[in-house]
Amino acid sequence: MKCLMIKPKWVTQILNGLKDEEYRTWPTNYRGDFLIGCSSTKFTNAFIAAVAEITDCEYSEKKGVYVWQLANIRPVKPIPIKGQLRLFESGINDYEVITDEEGKAAYDAATWIIKQQKEKRKGV
Protein backbone atom coordinates (compact mmCIF):
# COMPACT_ATOMS: atom_id res chain seq x y z
CA MET A 1 0.00 0.00 0.00
CA LYS A 2 1.18 3.52 -0.70
CA CYS A 3 2.37 5.67 2.21
CA LEU A 4 3.04 9.35 2.81
CA MET A 5 5.21 10.52 5.71
CA ILE A 6 3.87 13.56 7.54
CA LYS A 7 5.29 15.50 10.50
CA PRO A 8 3.81 14.54 13.89
CA LYS A 9 2.19 17.95 14.41
CA TRP A 10 0.11 17.53 11.25
CA VAL A 11 -0.63 13.83 11.85
CA THR A 12 -2.15 14.77 15.20
CA GLN A 13 -4.37 17.36 13.54
CA ILE A 14 -5.43 14.84 10.89
CA LEU A 15 -6.26 12.22 13.53
CA ASN A 16 -8.21 14.75 15.59
CA GLY A 17 -10.33 15.75 12.61
CA LEU A 18 -8.85 19.26 12.44
CA LYS A 19 -7.12 18.75 9.09
CA ASP A 20 -8.55 17.01 6.02
CA GLU A 21 -6.18 18.51 3.47
CA GLU A 22 -2.49 17.87 2.89
CA TYR A 23 -0.38 20.48 1.12
CA ARG A 24 2.45 19.47 -1.19
CA THR A 25 4.53 21.23 -3.85
CA TRP A 26 3.84 18.33 -6.20
CA PRO A 27 0.62 16.72 -7.44
CA THR A 28 -0.55 13.12 -7.33
CA ASN A 29 -2.83 11.26 -9.70
CA TYR A 30 -3.28 8.54 -7.10
CA ARG A 31 -6.79 8.14 -5.65
CA GLY A 32 -7.72 5.68 -2.96
CA ASP A 33 -6.51 4.42 0.40
CA PHE A 34 -2.98 5.15 1.58
CA LEU A 35 -1.08 4.91 4.86
CA ILE A 36 -0.24 8.02 6.85
CA GLY A 37 3.21 7.71 8.33
CA CYS A 38 4.30 9.82 11.28
CA SER A 39 7.88 10.89 10.63
CA SER A 40 10.56 10.31 13.25
CA THR A 41 11.53 12.83 15.91
CA LYS A 42 14.11 12.99 18.68
CA PHE A 43 11.58 11.13 20.83
CA THR A 44 10.10 8.55 18.47
CA ASN A 45 10.90 6.44 15.45
CA ALA A 46 8.75 6.71 12.34
CA PHE A 47 5.52 4.70 12.36
CA ILE A 48 2.26 4.21 10.49
CA ALA A 49 -0.47 6.14 12.36
CA ALA A 50 -3.52 5.99 10.10
CA VAL A 51 -5.07 4.99 6.83
CA ALA A 52 -7.01 7.51 4.75
CA GLU A 53 -8.31 8.06 1.26
CA ILE A 54 -7.04 10.60 -1.26
CA THR A 55 -10.18 11.80 -3.04
CA ASP A 56 -8.82 14.73 -5.04
CA CYS A 57 -5.72 16.82 -5.75
CA GLU A 58 -5.90 20.32 -7.17
CA TYR A 59 -3.51 23.23 -7.44
CA SER A 60 -4.36 26.25 -5.27
CA GLU A 61 -3.22 29.52 -6.83
CA LYS A 62 -3.91 31.28 -3.53
CA LYS A 63 -1.69 28.96 -1.47
CA GLY A 64 0.79 28.16 -4.25
CA VAL A 65 0.66 24.41 -3.52
CA TYR A 66 -1.26 21.29 -4.45
CA VAL A 67 -4.09 20.49 -2.06
CA TRP A 68 -4.71 16.80 -1.48
CA GLN A 69 -8.22 16.11 -0.16
CA LEU A 70 -8.30 13.43 2.56
CA ALA A 71 -11.36 11.43 3.60
CA ASN A 72 -12.29 8.35 5.60
CA ILE A 73 -9.40 8.84 8.05
CA ARG A 74 -8.96 5.89 10.41
CA PRO A 75 -6.29 5.50 13.10
CA VAL A 76 -4.41 2.21 13.06
CA LYS A 77 -2.30 0.35 15.58
CA PRO A 78 1.20 1.78 15.10
CA ILE A 79 3.47 -0.09 12.70
CA PRO A 80 7.18 0.81 12.57
CA ILE A 81 8.36 1.98 9.16
CA LYS A 82 11.44 3.46 7.57
CA GLY A 83 10.16 6.64 5.98
CA GLN A 84 10.86 7.83 2.48
CA LEU A 85 10.20 10.99 0.55
CA ARG A 86 7.07 11.47 -1.56
CA LEU A 87 4.24 8.96 -1.90
CA PHE A 88 5.95 5.56 -1.82
CA GLU A 89 5.08 1.88 -1.88
CA SER A 90 5.40 0.76 1.76
CA GLY A 91 5.11 -3.00 1.38
CA ILE A 92 2.56 -2.91 4.21
CA ASN A 93 -0.88 -4.25 3.31
CA ASP A 94 -2.09 -5.51 6.68
CA TYR A 95 -3.05 -3.06 9.40
CA GLU A 96 -5.52 -2.96 12.27
CA VAL A 97 -7.91 -0.04 12.56
CA ILE A 98 -8.23 0.87 16.24
CA THR A 99 -11.41 1.63 18.16
CA ASP A 100 -12.50 5.07 19.30
CA GLU A 101 -11.26 4.44 22.83
CA GLU A 102 -7.87 3.22 21.62
CA GLY A 103 -7.79 6.04 19.09
CA LYS A 104 -8.27 8.67 21.80
CA ALA A 105 -5.30 7.24 23.69
CA ALA A 106 -3.21 7.40 20.49
CA TYR A 107 -4.21 11.04 19.89
CA ASP A 108 -3.36 11.93 23.49
CA ALA A 109 0.05 10.25 23.17
CA ALA A 110 0.81 12.08 19.91
CA THR A 111 -0.26 15.39 21.47
CA TRP A 112 2.00 14.72 24.48
CA ILE A 113 5.00 14.03 22.20
CA ILE A 114 4.46 17.30 20.35
CA LYS A 115 4.13 19.21 23.64
CA GLN A 116 7.40 17.69 24.90
CA GLN A 117 9.18 18.69 21.70
CA LYS A 118 8.00 22.29 22.01
CA GLU A 119 9.03 22.49 25.67
CA LYS A 120 12.47 21.08 24.92
CA ARG A 121 12.99 23.67 22.16
CA LYS A 122 11.95 26.44 24.55
CA GLY A 123 14.20 25.04 27.29
CA VAL A 124 11.32 24.41 29.73
Image (cartoon, rainbow, N blue to C red):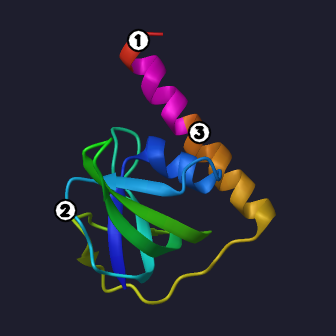
Compared to 124, does 2 lie above or below? below
The 10 Å Cα crowd at callout 2, few under 14, some 14 to 19, many 20 or more, is: few
Residue 32 painted magenta: no
Q: Nearer the viewer, mark 1 or mark 2?
A: 2
Task: Tell me which corner region of the image, top left, top right, bottom left or bottom right, holds residue 57.
Answer: bottom left
Q: Main secondary structure of the magenta part?
A: helix
Q: Hey, which residue is sitting farthest front in the picture? A: 61
Quarter of the picture holding the N terminus: bottom left
Compared to 116, does 119 lie above or below? above
Q: What span is colored magenta in the figure?
A: 113-120
Compared to 105, does 90 lie above or below? below
Q: Is residue 119 visible?
A: yes
Position of 27 with respect to 62 (left or right) is: left
Identify residue for label 3. Answer: 111
Which residue is at the front of the view, 31 or 106? 31
Q: CA distance from mark 3 to mark 2?
A: 24 Å
| Amino acid tagged 1 | Lys
Please tell me which of labels 1 and 2 falls first in the chain.
2
Identify residue for label 2. Answer: 85
Q: How many marks?
A: 3
Question: Would you say the residues marked 1 and 3 are in contact, meaning their CB atoms lie under 8 Å apart?
Answer: no
Identify residue for label 1. Answer: 122
Q: CA distance from mark 1 to mark 3?
A: 17 Å
Which residue is at the front of the view, 24 or 90? 24
Q: Position of residue 73 (x, y in %)?
A: 59, 68
The 10 Å Cα crowd at callout 1, few under 14, some 14 to 19, many 20 or more, is: few
The 10 Å Cα crowd at callout 3, few under 14, some 14 to 19, many 20 or more, is: some
